[in-house]
Amino acid sequence: MMMMEESDFLSCCGSTKFAKEMMAASPFSSLDQATQSANHIWFNIVDIHGWLEAFGAHPQIGDNSSTANKTRTSAEWSKGEQSTAMATATDSTLQELLEWNAQYRQKFGFVFIICASGRSTSEILAELKKRYPNKPIVELEIAAGEQMKITELRLAKLFTAKGMKTSLSSPQPVAKDRVGVIGAHLTAVTEASASKEPRVVRTRPPITTHVLDVSRGCPGAGIEVQLEMWKGTQHCPSFREGGSGEWVLQGSSVTDSDGRSGALMGIVDDVAPGFYRISFNTGKHSPAGFFPYVSIVFEIKESQKSQHFHVPLLLSPFSFSTYRGS
């Protein structure tokens, strides 16, 4: 049983967390045992930052000048893994691959990850084009799976270099607990998308606002904002006084230095349909202005409850306007 070093595992996968956890789990009596540990550590212990760190350690496919690899061994392995692609590349396909790589990185924020061993340039390019339309969360899962394929190949190379047993006794179950959770989440979103109104995974409250002082050409900072919803037996609020119902406060905030308000309500999948009112204490911001406060009333219909509503205020001392943003 031969001891490994942390740099050995870093050559297999460019995540520092992965290398440290593998070192802690070693020594391994066989490649079988090391592969099982690697899968568990990668999918259940290493976090998203570790995944991105590992992705960043890969050179862009087709870019021989890249210095992304963290170790000399991983650089040599990367060159070997891309040998088929480079041998089958022409000037035109290589240029197209580089251009698509750049588009991919701009969209997803990390280099295109694929187990390139034995794949031609045309095969890799076709897979890149196929995966490019993916949502980021889908592509992150796929890239993590491809990273583990690469890691398993490199572990086998490492064991061979160390003169250790490399045969696997039987196909091993892969401990992809966290990816399973991501997959389940995506399944739920996909099922919901079968309805007429596309579903969204919210990262912010469904109703937001900001204020721009157009007379000064700068954000409207320090303005008190409150969000209310109409409640009552009367279906909708009337511009006349009276009627059965009232405005119920949903949340309040103060605009920051960029003129944006904090959260006026919680993050929910579906906002309750109905009438809403956003009010701004503009008199405090512009005492000499004509409007002591501004209220904007709008309606969210049943068919719109999963959408986002950004309702900004464009303010000057003697006029204001608004629009529905995104």
Image: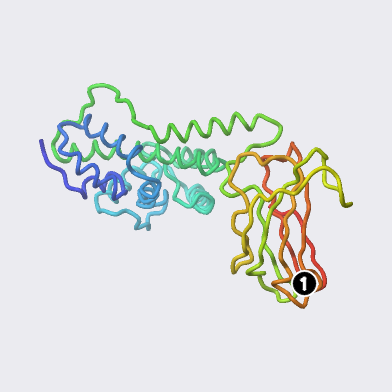
Q: Residue at x 64, y 66 (%)?
A: 259
Where residue 289 appears, as percent x and y from the top left, is 78, 74
Q: Amino acid at mark 1?
A: Ser
- Residue reaching furthest left? 1
For the point 56% across and 47% down, which residue is it? 203
Furthest-right residue in this view = 240
| SS category of the residue bearing label 1 | strand
Front residue (pair 62, 230): 230
303 versus 239 height, above or below: above
Residue 195: x percent and y percent?
Answer: 68, 30
Res. 320 image quadrant: bottom right
Quarter of the image for the N terminus: give it: top left
As rendered, which of 95 and 22 lies closer to the eye? 22
Which x, y percent locates residue 187? 54, 30
Tell whether 235 sits left or right of 108: right
Q: Is residue 205 left or right of residue 296?
A: left
Closer to us: 136 or 68: 136
For disc 1, the neighbor class at 10 Å (few under 14, some 14 to 19, many from 20) is some
- Identify the residue under disc 1: 316
